[in-house]
Image (cartoon, helix red, strand yellow):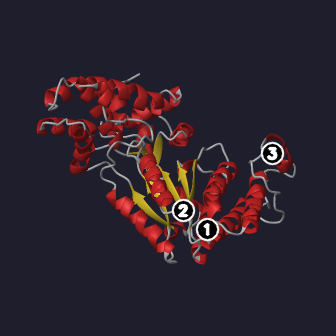
Amino acid sequence: MDPVRNPYAPGAGQRPPELAGRDTELTAFDVVLERIAHGRPERSLVLTGLRGVGKTVLLNQLRSAAISRGWGTGKIEARPDQSLRRPLSAALHMALRELGPRHRDPESMEAVLGVLKAFALRGAGGSDGPAKMRDRWQPGIDVPAAMGRGDSGDMEIDLVELLSDAAGVAADIGSGVALFIDEMQDVQPDDVSAICAACHELSQQGAPLIVVGAGLPHLPAVLSASKSYSERLFRYLRIDRLDRAAADRALLAPAEREDVAFEPAALDALYAAADGYPYFVQAYGKVTWDVAAASPITAADVAMAAPAAEAELAVGFFGSRYDRATPAEREYMHAMADLGGPAGAAVGTSDVAISLGRKPASLSPARDSLIKKGLVYSAERGQIAFTVPHFGRYLLSHAD
């Protein structure tokens, strides 16, 4: 088979050639946009799921849907060591630039940009924070910074004011603003609180601005810990692996466009190997295509390709994450794998301690660091699980 014509795309956040199995989420977002367009109240959205299920791809697709309706959009990827003030400023600036050409009141737009600039320049630290930030960074907004709005230094107050003003600009032209936040579980606690407060205020105003977040399965708990009313602020969509029909479509539709077919047994073997996880579907599909001599692709082709696909995943998908862990963290993860088995089932933190012959308190630093690195998450109180599908299987086959 010609590798140049290989349609499969196992990349981080890279859109697959066929976005299968996400019609429910796309339809739900279309309803949100349509309701807001008609002045109806609607909640912001939060996508949750393990790594490799396509949250970033879906987030990008939702953004494309908003852009196609003329909304102003901006996207950021949260990092645990970074305040949202600067990246959120850049994202909102992009959204306002998209709306600007249709806005007929330059003074109103400049006023909002002035608030945005004030928000961007206002440090969250001590009294000398703003000056130091101005010395080393400018947001590229060619209007004077406003005074007395969006610049208090309190993230919650400033964000509510800024987003309210931005929503007003969108309302003036019958449009909306959508801010997309990837890796939302890494947003700092004060910023999470500010986002929840802003969404709460905007929903009460019926303002045309929504936040669409994506993160790991424990993201709802992160939001709830910040504001007790967060479960009513957001509509939570759990993004899971593909069912058999969707996984088959993800493989068949791109192949058919290249006049290539799969034998049923090959599809059986590919689903068993990929287990329905979108990233794995693309990874196994790509290697199988390259191995196959001709159409139709057979189960023998899949069997020949599987070791190469697994080797690539071991390095790029699993190994790159494992290498970030310290020896103590690796010990903790291997104990989780021993207890949870190849399926990577959630295990009790006390059981991990017993397995390692340690006191639970002594393992807290390793567990907390693994959570911060996004390798594990607290499935529920006293339970821990891997954020990466099949990670337990990988660890059991790659013992230190």
First in sequence: mark 1 vs mark 3: 3
SS for callout 2 = loop
Q: Earlier in the sequence, mark 2 or mark 3?
A: 2
Cα gap from disc 2 to disc 3, whole angstroms: 31 Å
Find out whether the residues at labels 1 and 2 contact each other: C-beta distance under 8 Å: yes
Residue matched to label 3: 133
Image point 43% across, 63% down: which residue?
A: 29
* Element carrying mark 3: helix
Image point (14%, 32%), residue name: 296
Query: Judging from the image, what secondary structure is the residue with disc 1 in?
Result: helix
Residues 352 and 282: in front is: 282
Alpha carbons under labels 1 and 2: distance apart: 8 Å
Amino acid bearing label 3:
Met
In what quadrant of the picture does the C terminus appear? top left
When the figure is inspected, residue 185 is found, relative to residue 275, above or below; the finding is below
Whether residue 30 sits left or right of residue 233 in the image: it is left
Which residue does the numbered mark 2 point to in the structure image?
A: 71
Q: CA distance from mark 1 to mark 3?
A: 29 Å
- Identified at 38% across, 59% down, the residue is 26
Q: Which image quadrant for residue 109?
A: bottom right
State yes or no: discs 1 and 3 in contact (Cβ < 8 Å).
Answer: no
Mark 2 or mark 1, which is nearer the start of the sequence?
Answer: 2
Q: Quadrant of residue 192?
A: bottom right
What's the amino acid at mark 1? Answer: Ala
**Mark 1, residue position:** 170
Q: Is residue 23 left or right of residue 146?
A: left
At label 2, which amino acid type do we have? Trp
Assess disc 2: are there few (<14), some (14-19) or many (≥20) residues with their C-alpha within 10 Å of its C-alpha.
Answer: many
Q: Which mark is residue 281?
A: none
Please indicate whether residue 91 sits to the left or right of residue 345 in the image.
right
